[in-house]
Image (cartoon, rainbow, N blue to C red):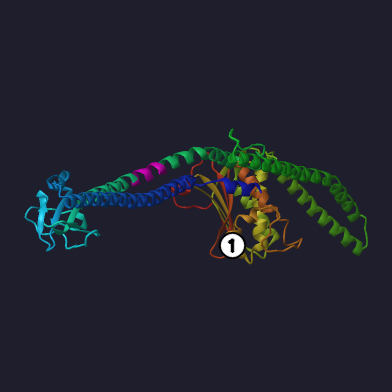
Amino acid sequence: MLVTLRRRLSVPSLRRRLGVRLRSALAAAVVVAIASLLAGGVLFVTARAILLDNINTAANDKAAQIAAALTSGSDLPTLLRPSARDRTVVQILDAAGRVEAASDALAGETAISALRPGPGERIKEQRHLPGVHEEPFWIVAQGVSTPVGNRTVLVAESLDTVGDGSDAVIVALLLGLPLLALTVGVATFLFVGRTLRPVEAMRLQAATITAHNLHERLPVPATDDEIAALASTMNTMLDRIEASSAAQRRFVGDASHELRSPLATVQANADLLETAGLPATAARSVGRIRTESTRMARLVEDLLLLARADNDQLRTRRQDVDLDDLVYTERERLAELHPNLNVRAIFDPVRVEGDPDALLRVVRNVIDNAIRHAHTKITISVAGRDRMAEIVIGNDGPPIPPSDRERIFDRFVRLDGSRSRMDGGSGLGLAIARDIVSAHGGTLTADDLDQGAAMRIRLPLPTTFNDSSAAEPYVSRYESS
């Protein structure tokens, strides 16, 4: 459960840490851009409609004024004057379509429109005027009945104000939209970053929590919000994990201690029975009792060692250890106990600082594991390279699947599925070996070989060690098979 918690809260790179902020900023910028486009489109259509309506109203009013003047016989020169910048021009046509009067801007021009409404009618169109006027005009044609006959009033209103207004809206969108989206994106990035600071503090703290410091807790923000609730929930879960882990360690430690005395009694009585001259059948039973009690004693010792490791009480002595001598001794034991196996061993002189008994146990556990999986051959090498002492113990058995190369170091894990007491082991050997190697500042990993699998033990070398493999060709101290 603790490993799962750390994996969920741990973020391995800066890119992932900034991922939420970047996604939030981009999402906010995109939403603002889309909303601004929609709002700008509505504004554009609305503004253009209002401007067109204003121009149409002005043209209608002008046409109505001139029609009233024609009907009453009033003077027209004032009404025929163009508005500022020639935005409004007028023509009056007779019944034959000839121009009777016009604004100065249209002097000498023919009729600006072919519209000929009847008296009292009004027709509209949009078109360009002849002459120098490049912008389109909105033309209102109104028929008028006068004392001297029917007349047609043509009023043309320039649409350049509509174009200017539309252009202003488009320019505002083109300039303001990127600036607005950028501003919102940056602001969102900064604000989300400030909001996620407590989460980052929780992540950093969670990354430091291991089985050895379960008493640590995540910082709880002062704000009464969802992040504070998350921190409180995580701390409550850590409380339960710590209590469960402590109870488990106490149980394993207490049970192991309590089992040592009765096991010692069983072994002592088995020793006495072996010398009592019992019948053959009873003697075989006593032999089995002694074998199983020895195996159980070894299992109890393993559990005690793991309990000390869990409680951070795995203390190791520090003295010079010749790894090549230590591994050579185990190689001799292997050759004596399993003469049917082909053992290939190559040793370089390598010395480290550590606990010789603990390191011997590591090598023995790994070799015993290799024996259980080997078909015909085991390889052992000791060398110093890259400022690390390296022991590689391989076998020609089945390779270890990549997905199981970490799981095999968990307790009571056996990939072969064997539950045989004689062949399957207890499933604690590799877990104990990794704990001891970790206590020495090293690593224990599983690798592939061309045929089979290997366990690689790496331990830090003393600063005074001369790494001969980096300075001269490889020279063996021992090489045997």
411 vs 271, nearest the viewer = 411
Where does residue 176 sit, x and y in percent of width and height? 33, 44
User: Is 10 or 426 nearer to us in this picture?
Assistant: 10
- Would you place residue 327 above or below residue 201 in this image? below
Residue at x-position 40% and y-position 51%: 34
Residue for point 79% across, 50% down: 297
Which element carries disc 1, helix, strand or loop? Answer: loop
- Amino acid under disc 1: Pro
Please give the count of numbered marks on the rendered protein.
Answer: 1
Name the outermost residue toward the top.
Answer: 222
- Can residue 464 be seen from the camera position used here? no
Q: Position of residue 303 (x, y in %)?
A: 74, 48
Q: Residues within 10 Å of mark 1 (few under 14, many from 20)?
A: few
Magenta stretch, main secondary structure class: helix
Left or right position of 79 against 461: left
Would you name the residue on which mark 1 appears?
401
Q: Nearer the viewer, residue 224 or 18?
A: 224
Which quadrant would the C terminus be assigned to in this image? bottom right
Task: Report whether 319 appears left or right of 268.
Answer: left
Q: Position of residue 141 (x, y in %)?
A: 21, 58
Percent across and percent down for residue 337 are: 70, 59
Examine the rendering and report whether any part of residue 161 can be seen.
Answer: yes
Does residue 444 belong to the magenta stretch? no
User: Is residue 182 inside the magenta stretch?
Assistant: yes
- Identify the magenta region: 177-185
Q: Would you say 24 lies left or right of 398 here?
A: left
